[in-house]
Image (spheres, helix red, strand yellow):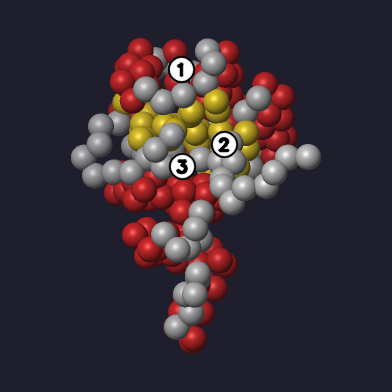
Amino acid sequence: MPTAKAAPGKLLLTPQDHTLIMIDFQSQMAFATKSIDAVQLRNNAALVAHAAAGFGASTILTTVAEKSFSGPMFEEIGRAFPGQKMLDRTSMNTWEDAAVIARVNEIGKGRVVLAGLWTSVCIVGPALSAIDQGFEVYVIADACGDVSDEAHQRAMERMIQAGARPMTSLQYLLELQRDWARTATYDLTTGIAKNFGGAYGLGIIYAKTMFGAQEGH
């Protein structure tokens, strides 16, 4: 029988062990996205971006045909990474873009976390390609969207069958924090949750305002 230890599992993410790639959060892609409400999508993308920026996770921001067709990346993502260069591509598959891959190799981490539009094209492509090359891949399912529920779900199933690990935007934030006794990032985490965490964020606002409550105490 194995012996239990008070220690995290190796499959859990930490801020230092992965590269987040945020892909094609652009107007033209969002117009046709039907599997998730556009407001919720933007909110979830902002939560992921601010979590990664706040915890210092390595992040690549990439667009497709930004100036000629698809438009700029959502401004709430850009605000999380002021001054960071957007890598613009012609390829639908991010993993076939030389500039993106050069940055992945420069960062040098074997875990990749993906979020973006559309799930069945711009996320499936890099997910399957990275897995084929030996990377561990996580996909933030509710920070992705597609032209229909069917398209999104079949894409998620296809990636999971290949070995990708699904998660959600709030899960990503809380997995990076993981212990409320980590006071250095406590205000960061609860602040992001209050701004972008939906009903959970409202609960934090209520508890702190009414009772002065604080997790971990």
Q: Is residue 153 left or right of residue 184?
A: right
Residue 182 vertical placement versus 49 (above, below): below
For marks 1 and 3, give the CA distance: 23 Å
Q: How many neighbours does mark 1 have within 10 angstroms: few (below 14), some (14-19), or many (20 or more)?
A: some
Residue 206 vertical placement versus 55 (above, below): below
For marks 2 and 3, give the CA distance: 10 Å
Front-most of residues 154 and 64:
154
Which residue is tagged 1? 95
| Amino acid type indicated by mark 3 | Thr
Percent x, y of residue 39 = 51, 54
Percent x, y of residue 79 = 29, 49
Q: How many neighbours does mark 3 have within 10 angstroms: few (below 14), some (14-19), or many (20 or more)?
A: some
- Tag 2 near tag 3, CB within 8 Å: no
Q: Residue at x 41, y 42 (%)?
A: 15
**How many marks on residues?**
3
Which residue is tagged 3? 14
Of discs 2 and 1, which sits in the foreground? 2
| Amino acid type indicated by mark 1 | Trp
- Tag 1 near tag 3, CB within 8 Å: no
Secondary structure at numbered mark 3: loop
Q: Is residue 108 left or right of residue 204?
A: left
For marks 2 and 1, give the CA distance: 25 Å
Which residue is tagged 2? 10
Q: Is residue 201 visible?
A: yes
Of discs 1 and 3, which sits in the foreground? 3
- Tag 2 near tag 1, CB within 8 Å: no
Percent x, y of residue 167 = 60, 42
Extreme bottom residue here? 210
Front-most of residues 146 and 55:
55
Mark 1 / mark 3, whichever is N-terminal:
3
The image quadrant of residue 106 is top left
